[in-house]
Image (cartoon, grey):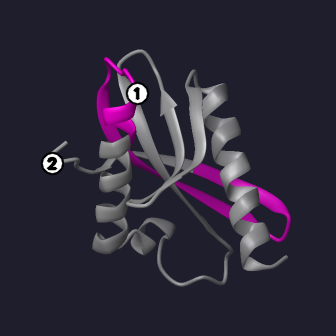
Amino acid sequence: MNKAQTGMRGELAAARWLREHGYAILAANYRCRMGEVDIIAADRTYICFVEVKTRAPQSLGTPSDAVTPVKRQRILAAAKLYLSTHRVQLQPRFDVIEVFVNGETVRKVRLIPNAFDGEGI
């Protein structure tokens, strides 16, 4: 499985996990000129801008380590644009979902709520 296929598998697993845990998926792969967000989801309190990171056992570090400051800024910029163009009364939150795979098998999905803050939003 190549990197793109692994990433897609992780995003599908993350969306399924969110739905199973009571979140509504508002958008997937939201892209704008400012950046992108893998999944935008909502529960009763928060609108969650979710970065999904998928890793195989041979990968170094944790998946969330790959969410760099530059990546965070792009997510924040995309979230700000999304919020300005959609009527949302929920508090924004910035999460990371780590998906651990072994070949084609998803081994574990882990939500890290408030993985970084949305200061300035």
Q: Position of residue 86 (x, y in %)?
A: 40, 27
Front residue of this view, candidates 95 and 25? 25
Label 2 vs label 1: CA separation? 19 Å
Picture residue at 66% right of the left edge, 84% below the top:
58
- Residue 72 colored magenta? no
What mark, if any, has residue 119 been given in the picture?
2
Mark nearer the N terminus (2 vs 1)? 1
Identify residue type, mark 2.
Glu
Asked whether the beta carbons under mark 2 and mark 1 sit within 8 Å of each other, the answer is: no
Picture residue at 40% right of the left edge, 72% below the top:
65
The residue that mark 1 highlights is: 86
- Residue 104 colored magenta? yes
Is disc 2 surrounded by few (<14), some (14 to 19) or many (20+) residues within 10 Å?
few
Image quadrant occupied by the C terminus: top left
**Prevailing secondary structure class for the magenta stretch in the rendered image:** strand
Q: On the picture, is 49 further left or further right than 81?
A: right
Q: Report helix, strand or loop for mark 2.
A: loop
Q: Give the tally of numbered discs.
A: 2
Identify residue type, mark 1.
His
Picture residue at 37% right of the left edge, 68% below the top:
71
What mark, if any, has residue 96 been given in the picture?
none
Front residue of this view, candidates 99 and 81? 81
Q: Position of residue 50 (x, y in %)?
A: 47, 47
Q: Position of residue 93 (x, y in %)?
A: 32, 38
Q: Position of residue 1 (x, y in %)?
A: 85, 76
Question: Which region is colored magenta?
Answer: 82-109
